[in-house]
Amino acid sequence: MFNIDQHYSRNTYSYLKHFIRRDDKVLDVGSGNCLVAQKIKDELKAAIHCVDVCNHSKTSITPKIFDGRKIPYGNKTFKSSLAAFVLHHCPHQEELLQEMIRVSSQEIIILEDVPQHWYDHWFIVLHRFTSYFKYNSKKMIFRRDGEWKALFRKLGLRVKQEIEIKKDRGLVYPVNRKLYLLTVYA
Ligand SMILES: C[S@@+](CC[C@H](N)C(=O)[O-])C[C@H]1O[C@@H](n2cnc3c(N)ncnc32)[C@H](O)[C@@H]1O
């Protein structure tokens, strides 16, 4: 039977798998149901760790719970950290990104909604409403592509690669989305 969580996690994984290699130590920030982390662990054999503000796991992986600001790991603990459709739920985006930079030695992978058309904002109103109940998201901040890039630049992150996420991911929420592969300026 069709399972929406499995569909989304498979789709997210299909973009991430190109940037994570066997034995990489990776942090999944805002891991949600942890289905993506489980696939990374099972299929790529990477050492994945999860943090979230709440435990929504539907797998045997238990995320470390944190305050959404200070990541409970030391400097450069991970090769890379990822946040898939998480930052727009965070009132402290800049602080969290700085923490991802601190704990990562090489790369940061961000998947984000990047509203582009006027009608995207109607879907975002719906997303705000459902996220309030599902994730207790009280202050969501959406940015356009140029605004994400300005924030990355401000924090010393270079966009090494960007990929459009195809709309077939979810026809009920056809907002533009992107994957940004970021490296820290030397
Ligand atoms: C749409 S879900 C994405 C889950 C997962 N990354 C995925 O792609 O399946 C958003 C997640 O962000 C988490 N979240 C919200 N605010 C956060 C914060 N400040 N820091 C980390 N995670 C946060 C929520 O608890 C939720 O698990």
Image (cartoon, helix red, strand yellow):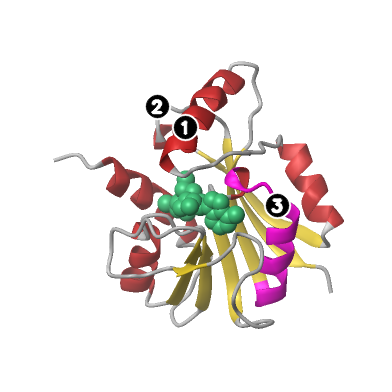
C-beta proximity under 8 Å, tags 2 and 1: yes
**Rounded to the nearest whole Å, what is the CA distance between mark 3 and mark 2?**
29 Å
Quadrant of the image for the N terminus? top left
| C-beta proximity under 8 Å, tags 3 and 2 | no
**Considering the image in quadrants, where does the C terminus appear?**
bottom right
Q: In this view, does 172 lie to the left or right of 140?
A: left
Q: Where is residue 173 in the image (x, y as percent from the top left)?
A: 45, 28
Q: Which residue is drawn at 56% across and 27% down?
A: 124
Q: Where is residue 9 in the image (x, y as percent from the top left)?
A: 36, 51
Q: Mark 2 points at which residue?
A: 171
Going by the numbered disc 1, the residue's amino acid type is Lys
The kind of residue on which mark 3 rests is: His
Can residue 105 be seen from the camera position used here? no
Q: Is mark 2 within 8 Å of ligand 1?
A: no
Mark 3 residue element:
loop
The numbered mark, 3 or 1, whose residue comes first in the sequence reads 3
- Crowdedness near tag 3: few (<14), some (14–19) or many (≥20) residues, C-alpha within 10 Å: some
Q: Up-down: is 138 above or below 30?
A: above
Q: Please say if the residues under marks 3 and 1 sit with CB atoms less than 8 Å apart.
A: no
Instruction: Tell me the residue that label 3 is attached to.
Output: 92
Give the alpha-carbon distance from disc 3 to disc 1, as whole Å. 28 Å
Image x and y of residue 100, in percent: 66, 67
Disc nearer the start of the sequence (3/2): 3
Is the residue marked 3 within 8 Å of ligand 1, measured from its CB?
yes
Q: Nearer the viewer, residue 39 or 75?
A: 75
The residue that mark 1 highlights is: 167
